[in-house]
Image (cartoon, rainbow, N blue to C red):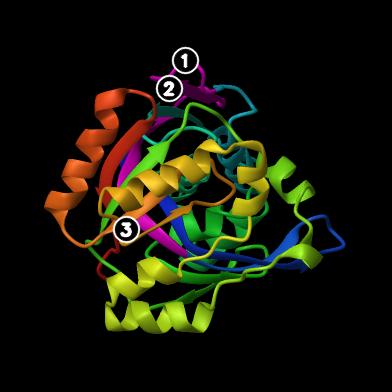
Amino acid sequence: MDSICIKARAKINLSLDVLGKREDGYHDVRMIMQSIGLHDKVFLEAIDERCIKVTCDKHWVPTDCDNIAYKAAAVLMDKFDIPKGISIRIVKKIPVAAGLAGGSADAAAVLKGMNDIFSLNLKEDDLMQLGKSIGADIPFCIKGGTMLAEGIGEVLTEIEPLRNVNIVLVKPRISVSTAWVYKNLEIGKISSRPDTELLINLIEKKDIQNLGKNMVNVLEAVTINRHRVISEIKEKLVSLGALGSMMSGSGPTVFGVFGNRVTAEKACKNINRDNTWECILTETFCEER
């Protein structure tokens, strides 16, 4: 196999709790992560010249060593002394710096694709361990589905798959630094935390209505303090029929959970009409295992 195309799926957080700061600078978290249908396409091809070439259809995405997909390729090339090079072409659909793990998803696709192209015979756990050294979300992006994530996000426990739930994503035309959000989070002042066990139980029961009502992201307060538009979007989604609405990750993307496709489509059409925010209709996704 000389080439491959992989769908790099975005994620949302159905809950996000921060337990404390670690000595290594990371934070211990406990959150429910969920893959969604929205994805980039990552085209990989082995090339004779021993180098890494990255291209992307969006000019604002870096194509040098600042790109996390480039870093993932470099890790594999160095560790396994791969004699050939790799061409990486990214067709970007996931908004950048949006709390949807778009970069991590691309990096995960590179790890999986190069494993196949160069017959490295690495198991999923091996790829996840390598991914952890590059970015905290990469292990989840390799595994995907519906997961309880702990540690820095790399300790994953499978939850009953949550498939085909209608999701409307809304991204205001701003970017948010994850590092800034965590730096400004005052853990001792968190007033509302998610009931993770309750949420897991609701997912197992497919109780989407109560799932929507009980989602909590402790990072919201930090991001909303600087960007009030996030509160506006949450209120807008609920007014348009969302069962619940929450910021994903460190933001700024907000998503709404919808009980049926028709209501979700109408909501997305309504928001897109103003052209104020970027709005995407998608759904939760889990591969059959």
Residue extent of the magenta highlight: 33-61
Where residue 289 sits, quadrant-wise, is: bottom left
Q: Nearer the viewer, residue 219 or 90?
A: 219
N-terminal of the pair, mark 1 or mark 3, is 1
1 sits left or right of 171 in the view: left
N-terminal of the pair, mark 2 or mark 3, is 2
Q: Residues within 10 Å of mark 3 (few under 14, many from 20)?
A: many
Image quarter in which the N terminus is found: top left
As shown in the figure, which amino acid type bears the numbered disc 2?
Cys
Label the magenta part by its dominant secondary structure: strand
Mark 1: secondary structure: loop
76 sits left or right of 40 in the view: right
Query: Please, is residue 112 above or below residue 149 in the view?
Result: above
Q: Which residue is mark 3?
A: 257
Q: Which residue is mark 2?
A: 56
Task: Judge whether residue 95 is colored magenta.
Answer: no
How far is mark 2 from mark 3, CA to CA?
31 Å
Q: Nearer the viewer, residue 86 or 101?
A: 101
How far is mark 1 from mark 3, CA to CA?
32 Å
As shown in the figure, which amino acid type bears the numbered disc 3?
Val
Q: Which residue is mark 1?
A: 59
Q: Are marks 1 and 2 in contact (CB under 8 Å)?
A: yes
Residue 227: x %, y % from top left:
60, 36
Mark 2: secondary structure: strand
In the rendered structure, find residue 149 and report the number of the disc placed on it. none
Q: Are marks 2 and 3 in contact (CB under 8 Å)?
A: no
Where residue 193 sits, quadrant-wise, is: bottom right
